[in-house]
């Protein structure tokens, strides 16, 4: 048993060590860092312990106080609206429920106290059960914790140790022996199974941004005109980590000034659930069924895809696609047989929905017949949707004279009957019998 004089001396030495601790090398480094978190009103953080001296190898206990720099001036965390929780299974320490009468493992208790986060770790009663770090520079995860703010509150991923460090932060290690007198191998060794000895800690903290997708977010972004002044938009994502949703913006392109595009929002995840992302998914999926109506034909539109990052609502431009809106015309028309004997077949494309008429005239301008569609019906003011390789036929009468004929196809946009928008195609066909 220690004499009274030795006890007084030991207490004096420990007090002296506490006075000069700031000038002595550290025994332990404690690192506070934020980690993956995709919920706006939470901060997920870890506490990592690293042994940096040879003075100890058995972990005892700790008390840490943390605060948020944005809230210090207003009194810190309100314990009625903020909570902090330990994430089960995250600590490398063996854990048990706190028991003041018998501790063989560790108990971790996070709380909000006096506007600060308080993390208390209670250690086992004896060094026989203490967690051992056999080598210097060895680290372990003390635990992962989640701070939850009131709904609607978005916090920066920044936490820090409360200062002064040596007042608010405390750590200790357990001793299974203490060499007091003599020199090896004749050293006197005293065993104190329950001693917790103060550490010289070196706390540090940093805010690690939440893990997010890199620049390879999407495979492709396409804008395709589908007719009737409607553009279909689609894209495929490779990764959606940290992305809350997508916004699609549109600008009318001035060919003389491509650098000055005035984008306006057209589709948004806030009003269209098809654009909501999966912020915890490292893989992507296909976004389709997205449509936008435009105002003008014969113009080029630019579409810009924007990802909204969940933390701080950062808008990140991902890609831009261009699409030309055609006029509602008949295009690519040609005769399948020319010269022909009885039937002349016209193949044609329709670039948008039109009302179409097709007739045959001789060289004097006399109308000979109407062309018929594939069902044999006369093509007179018939509606055609956007499409390719339609067929129309001229069935020459048995008494039709040999010679040249004009096949005239006239189309008007369904949504615009003005003569300026009319499409007119003339094909010359030669009848030979």
Image: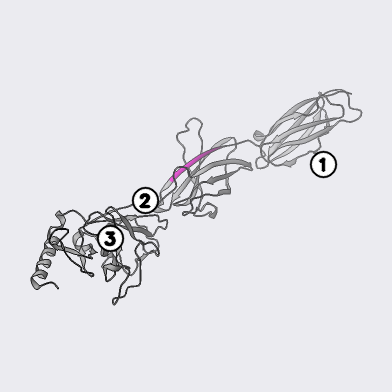
* Mark pair 1, 2: CA separation: 65 Å
Residue 67, disc: 3
Q: Is residue 394 left or right of residue 159?
A: right
Residue beneath the point at 10% across and 66% down = 12
User: Which region is colored magenta?
Assistant: 316-322
Colour setting: one colour
Magenta stretch: includes residue 354: no
Contact between marks 1 and 2 (CB within 8 A): the answer is no
* Mark pair 3, 1: CA separation: 79 Å
Q: At numbered mark 3, what does the secondary structure look like: helix, strand or loop?
A: strand
Q: Quadrant of the C terminus?
A: top right
Look at the image and tell me whether residue 126 can be seen: yes
* Mark pair 2, 3: CA separation: 18 Å
Contact between marks 2 and 3 (CB within 8 A): the answer is no
Q: At numbered mark 2, what does the secondary structure look like: helix, strand or loop?
A: loop
Which residue in the protein does label 1 denote?
A: 375
Q: Position of residue 385 (x, y in %)?
A: 70, 42
- Residue projecting furthest to the front: 186
Q: Nearer the viewer, residue 270 or 308?
A: 308
Q: Nearer the viewer, mark 1 or mark 2?
A: 2
Secondary structure mostly taken by the magenta-highlighted segment of the chain: strand
């Amino acid at each position: 048993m220690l004499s009274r004089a030795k006890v007084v001396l030991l207490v004096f030495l420990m007090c002296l060590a506490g006075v000069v601790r700031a000038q002595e090398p550290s025994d332990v480094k404690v690192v506070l860092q934020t980690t993956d978190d995709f919920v706006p009103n939470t901060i997920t953080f870890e506490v990592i312990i690293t042994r940096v001296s040879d003075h100890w190898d058995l972990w005892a206990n700790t008390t840490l106080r943390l605060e948020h720099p944005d809230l210090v001036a207003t009194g810190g965390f309100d314990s009625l609206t903020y909570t902090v929780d330990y994430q089960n299974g995250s600590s490398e320490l063996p854990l048990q429920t706190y028991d003041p009468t018998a501790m063989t493992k560790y108990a971790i208790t996070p709380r909000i106290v006096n506007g600060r986060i308080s993390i208390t770790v209670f250690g086992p009663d004896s060094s026989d059960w203490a967690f051992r770090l056999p080598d210097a520079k060895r680290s372990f995860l003390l635990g992962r914790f989640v701070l939850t703010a009131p709904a609607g509150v978005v916090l920066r991923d920044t936490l820090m140790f409360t200062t002064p460090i040596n007042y608010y932060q405390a750590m200790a290690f357990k001793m299974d022996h203490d060499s007091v007198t003599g020199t090896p191998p004749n050293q006197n060794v005293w065993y104190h199974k329950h001693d917790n000895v103060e550490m010289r800690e070196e706390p540090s903290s940093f805010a690690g941004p939440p893990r997010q997708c890199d620049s390879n977010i999407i495979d492709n972004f396409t804008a395709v005109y589908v007719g009737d002044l409607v553009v279909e938009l689609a894209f495929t994502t490779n990764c959606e980590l940290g992305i809350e949703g997508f916004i699609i913006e549109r600008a009318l392109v001035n060919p003389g000034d491509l650098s000055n595009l005035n984008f306006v929002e057209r589709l948004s995840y806030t009003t269209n659930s098809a654009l909501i992302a999966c912020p915890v998914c490292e893989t992507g999926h296909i976004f389709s069924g997205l449509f936008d109506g435009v105002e003008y034909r014969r113009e080029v539109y630019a579409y810009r895809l924007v990802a909204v990052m969940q933390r701080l609502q950062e808008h990140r431009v991902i890609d831009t696609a261009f699409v030309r809106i055609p006029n509602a015309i008949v295009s690519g028309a040609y005769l399948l047989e020319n010269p022909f004997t009885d039937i002349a077949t016209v193949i044609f494309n329709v670039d948008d929905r039109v009302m179409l008429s097709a007739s045959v005239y001789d060289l004097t301008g006399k109308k000979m017949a109407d062309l018929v569609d594939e069902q044999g019906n006369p093509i007179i003011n018939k509606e055609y949707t956007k499409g390719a390789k339609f067929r129309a036929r001229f069935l020459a009468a048995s008494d039709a004279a040999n010679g040249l004929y004009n096949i005239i196809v006239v189309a008007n946009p369904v949504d615009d009957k003005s003569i300026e928008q009319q499409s007119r195609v003339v094909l010359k066909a030669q009848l030979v019998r």
